[in-house]
Amino acid sequence: MVQGTTSDAGKTTLVAGLCRLFADLKIKVAPFKPQNMALNSAVTPCGGEIGRAQALQAKAARLPLDVDFNPILLKPNSDTGAQVIVHGKALNHKTSSNMEANEYQDYKKVAMQAVLSSHKRLIKKYDLVVVEGAGSPAEINLREGDIANMGFAEAVDCPVLIIADIDKGGVFAQLVGTLMLLSQSEQDRVVGFVINRFRGDIKLLESGLTWLEKKTNKPVLGVLPYLHGLDISSEDALVTKQEFTEAKSSSARIRIVVLVYPHMSNHTDFDALRHHNDIDCQFLFAKGAEGENSPEKVTIPACDLIILPGSKNVRGDLAFLYQRGWHDDIAKHLRYGGKVIGICGGYQMLGKLIEDPKGLEGQAGVSHGLGYFPMQTVLKAQKTLTNVTGVLQLAQHRADIGGYEIHAGESTLINDGIKTSYLLDIQGEKQGLLSDDGQIAGCYLHGLFDQPKALKLFMTWLSHEVSDSPSIEALEEQAIERVNQACQKHLDMKKIKKIITDWYT
């Protein structure tokens, strides 16, 4: 099991690298994360939902997606509550699948049984399971009933590596402090440390590593370098995505702005745009995007395309959009000939009404959308979870497209005279909408830009021709291989293999 001193310490990356490394050694290896809190998810072949980080780790292990890789997924839709996904499906809890934090504390015993049943199935199918922890194991207020870190490790009796991010500073305090806050039995199962994101001359670090090993009586099993430009799926670390676009913002010919609201979901939809050399794709944060009620307005800058992304609390995020005055900015953008596209929750916002009669995503009620499509949406408890392929029809051209749908809303057209066309042909079924003037598009499909030909067609819609780009799958594969090579070079794999062998024999 890989645990971290903090969130974003590198747990996801290390697990992915180890999965690929062991898979290349012809060891049947699987990733596992007992409990994941994330707004980025993927759809399994059986129609279940797991965190995207575990989807990437499954790819690293060269496996199809499986709900057992992430048995508990929490999708926050407020500051104190989340939708609870168990074995890929939203939990039927009272009138909805949402739980407040205090309720979930009581539910953890049940959740642990789901975790252990998934783990039991995996260890029967695979030679090795590489487990990712969550956040830090030393969060005192979360240790009671823990199922994500040491609580799980103790329950299944597995060894633990602790990884820390030296780029944040204070790496020795992180590692020693984390270890000291664990119980004796938990300390005993920590078999070593990994330091992540190191820059510079390793010789300057060696005295510190020697001190750390003497202080803790635990080996340092590797120091991984800072991999510049590495883009690998994490839970929700959206802010780290900015470094990719800063360098090319002045030279890129196409400007795209993605609006960031408090419960934005599936930001990985835009990875292909950010990687393209001709595109400057920026996330627009408003002050207060983490939940503060700031009256300050951040204006949407001049651009070719505004994207309204997915949301785990559509009505709440729509209210946030109105409060920030972004609806006026969108209207101005359209008057000047710009384009707008809404994906999933953003698509629902482009309609006239959004109804949540059962309070599935917050307080029950009805919200008025932006009114660009003659459409109303009703949120329902039964989620749509599916992987799809089809054809994109745009700018009088067609391109093959694929992706996945994850949504609770059901949208229907209102016959009010507004002319629209369909954007997608999904296996003979018309889906998504395109306004009669061709400026506004929307659909439920995540992964719109992942196929190079589809991305190129969207840029043609923006009146731009772009160079060819690799698929997002190819980019992910390159990232996994970079991490794999770093693990092979900088981890003491002989010690790690011996630790595994000795622990289980």
Image: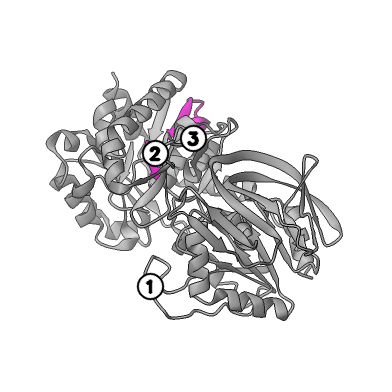
In this figure, which residue is indicated by the disc labeled 1? 293
Mark 3 touches mark 1? (CB < 8 Å): no
Does 202 appear above or below 385?
Answer: below
* Residue position marked by numbered label 3 in the rendering: 88
Q: In which quarter of the image is the C terminus?
A: top left
Q: How far apart are marks 2 and 3 (CA)?
A: 19 Å
Q: Residue at x 24, y 30 (%)?
A: 154
What is the x, y in percent for residue 404?
A: 63, 44
Viewer-side label of 3, 1 = 1
x, y percent for residue 412 = 69, 51
- In the picture of the structure, the residue carrying the numbered disc 2 is 94
Say what amino acid the circle numbered 3 marks.
Answer: Gly
Q: Give the range drawn in magenta.
A: 21-36
Camera-nearest residue between 246 and 344: 344
Does dot 2 land on a helix, a strand or a loop?
loop
- For marks 2 and 1, give the CA distance: 30 Å
Q: How crowded is mark 2: few (under 14 residues within 10 Å), some or many (20 or more)?
A: few
Q: In this view, does 25 lie to the left or right of 399?
A: left
Q: Which amino acid does label 1 sit on?
A: Asn
Label 2–label 1 contact, CB within 8 A: no
Label 1: few (<14), some (14–19) or many (≥20) C-alpha neighbours in 10 Å: few
User: Which labelled disc corresponds to residue 168?
Assistant: none
